[in-house]
Amino acid sequence: MSLLDRVRALLGDDAVEIAGGADAVPRVAPASPDAVALLLGTAREEGWRVRLEGAGTWLPADAPADLALTTRRLDRVPAVEPQDLSATAEAGIGCDLLRQQLADRGTWLALDPPGLAGRTLGSVVATATAGPLRHGFGAVRDHILGVTFVTGDGRLVQSGGRVVKNVAGYDLTKLEAGGFGAFGVIVLVHLRLRALPRADQTFVLAGTREDLTQVAEDVAAAGLQPAALELMSPALARRDGWALAVRLAGSAALVAAEEAGLRGASGGRFTALRAEEAHGFWMRAAESFATRPITFRTGGLPDSSDELLDLLQHQVGDEWVSASPGVGAIRWAGDTTVDRLRRLRRTLAGLEVPLTLERAPWPIRSAVGHFGAYREGVGPLVAGLRRTFDPGEAFVVAVEGSD
Amino acid sequence: MITPGLVEALTGIAGARHVRTAPAERLTYARDGLPTHRRVPAVVVLPGSRDELVAVVRLLAAHHVPFVPRGAGTGLSGGALADGAAVLLVLTRLNRILSLDPGNRVAVVEPGVVNVRLSAAAAAHGLHYAPDPSSQTACTIGGNVAENAGGPHCLKYGVTAQHVLALEVVLADGRIVELGSPGGEPWGPDVVGLFVGSEGNFGIATRIAVRLLPLPRAVRTLLAAFASLRAAGEAVSAVIASGIVPAALEMMDQSCIRAVEDSVYAAGYPRDAAAVLLVELDGHSDEAVAADTETVQELLSSHDAASIRVAADAGERERLWQGRKKAFGAMGRLSRDLVVQDAVVPRSALPDVLETIGRIAATYQVTVSNVFHAGDGNLHPNISFDARVPGLRTRVDAASTAIMEACVAVGGTITGEHGVGLDKLRYMPLIFDAESLAAMRAVRRVWDPEERVNPGKVVPVHACREWTGVRSVEWGVRSVASRDAPADSALRTPHSALDT
């Protein structure tokens, strides 16, 4: 029996979306977590190699595999609880659709990941790609209360729960958030929400990078706590010069007080954007990252941001860069070579700064790896965790590079 | 096996004064903050430096001897207890703040640094360490990391996991690993997040880098009294749903209020109230905090608060908080023994669950006092009792189980900040199936293949019984029993939480 016949027998005809794409890899879309488990259990028995896909808008669907497993039919939102500020959503729901459903109930997931609006929730969680809101609301993991995932040999595992505080058992959720699918396919996510902010205001200041870096330091020194404080390269901000964007979100009183503080800290130099301008500004910046072939992120200490930006400029250019100087995070997009990426990762490792390759064509991903240049003793731990959750190496994920 | 030769070798590393073998000395470490569990360690070692600690761990690895790391022993799960086959490693002498970088708001500490000492050191720079367990004047950062400790102000600022950036860890076999990065970005998969809350099962954190936060410039503290627990619970739901995130939102019931007011920690709580809410709002701007305070006051009033008192100054605020933070100690006045629970429920379920707990207390004729982090839905229904009364222990145990089952039934969990330890081991199958428990055990064996660090905690091994044969071997899970035991056998196994 062929692979496709086997899949059809297991999951039904409608689970097979594409019998063979451009690269002749059939795409299978299980309709339930149990179906995912069944498929992967069979994959383990048959020795199939599986690549994971969401909506196909972030990571290129180009990893060599026997079949592609897409989560796009796992698109239900079983629960939104405004009184508890929590929700449960399947991994294949698009972020845009989820956002709308949450807003209808007066709630908000304070994540603004890079990429197109229809990126799946599972993609955002698996790659831990936070956006500028990380400054005020934390990394992706801080928004996740629990997950259900399926291991490479078809085991359905729960971690965490749907309450906002939980220390029962080891926190496997942390491993799944940012694991790039190497430790399981996320099928269900329990989310921590916030109330939809009553006021949401964005301010932008254009100038030289040096000048704006100083302004960002002044804003931080003034004790302001914006939702986002983002330094963007001219191409990304679609401005003549660099741009420093500040987003204030919360109660009307809070936003008014922070706005007054921002004026004081910057000498009133920022320009307020109208609501639709602000929406377009942030959305275009997020989408721009999906238009470049390669994206990576680095995370250093806040006071090293400027130095790291210099380093990026020198080694790979800085045309498409977005930095959160308050938390030391930088996202870069563009085109470069395997050698440059490897060299940059080594250089950054010497500064105790990790480089995470977020997206790239498979030849680059497989050569460079999402992760690498680990600190002491981490490599064997990661290898052990991979063996634990994917004993047959079913998942085609470039965890580490080939160097 | 712990031999005289091994003890001699331990003495050679840590010094005779810091290796405790006399029965009276070892008894000192037989309990943690929870009085209902008791284990007497074979040997107690108090290393004086990281190098001594690593040398001790390597020695124990060479002899395949189990060990249990322990901080100040303030835990509430029986998690830091070692039995007669294990060595207890007490880390309180590793108590240096290694660096404090105000510019980057980062501190690096040894595991034995007392929580409040770090905040005191950071205060000089206008900063603080946000997680503030009620035991913060005694508990250590290492213990906080092991348990993923919370505290009242974690409602707004998050629990320990959100504040740990990087770790240096000594594994069970004595290898050193460096997890995370100084800026907090995971280096590879988030193994720092995985380590935090692993209750000592993955190794010992020898250096801990934490994030510090600016001290708020504006703070308002309110005390609201209610005529019923239901009304107080509904007020909590209303505040949460409003979108305002208080720094803290705590509840105490009448039994707890009276215990506090009868103690040296008396804070002026209204003795006749069925419940009080302690609400704190903070932020950068006085105007914004004042506006939020006004909104919260309106919400509390519209949910039948009988009275609302706003702390007039820092002194009054401190008194209000002291009563709350010392409430567990004050309960010692009620009786000689105490069971402390730590379940979490969805916040909207609080009113119903509080009434259910009241009914369970009446059914089993036990005294339950509630003092808890209402804003997180993190309950602490505490059962006071005298273990010398015949039959009372059995009723307390049954009431504990009934409360836990009621919390789980509404979508809750069994522990929000105290950890599983020994105390909640039997409840784990209530919330995790055998597959998920076995996955946890398999992860533990990646870090500690011999399962020597803090053995017998967190994962109920007997609930993983179906993991036999080929699959278990693939996962590295030891075949332990036949297949005939049901997956939820933990609940049917004769067992008492009160195993003194």
Image: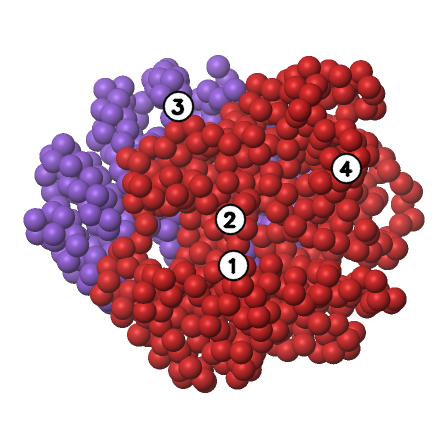
Q: Which chain is red?
A: B
**Amino acid type at mark 3:** Glu
Residue plotted at (15% across, 33% down): A209
Disc 2 sits on a residue from what chain? B
Q: Colour of chain A?
A: purple
Badge 3 element: loop
- x and y percent of residue B343 in the render? 63, 60
Rounded to the nearest angstrom, the CA distance separating label 2 from label 1 is: 9 Å
Describe residue B408's horizontal placement relative to residue B94 as left or right: right
Q: Are marks 1 and 3 on the same chain?
A: no
Q: Which residue is mark 1?
A: B325
Q: Which of the marked residues, 2 or 4, is nearer the chain's N terminus?
A: 4
Describe residue B157's horizontal placement relative to residue B216 as left or right: right
Rounded to the nearest angstrom, the CA distance separating label 3 from label 2 is: 31 Å
Rounded to the nearest angstrom, the CA distance separating label 1 from label 3 is: 39 Å
- Foreground mark, 1 or 3? 1
As drawn, the label of residue A352 is: 3
Residue plotted at (77% across, 75% down): B365
As drawn, the label of residue B136 is: 2
Q: Are marks 2 and 4 on the same chain?
A: yes
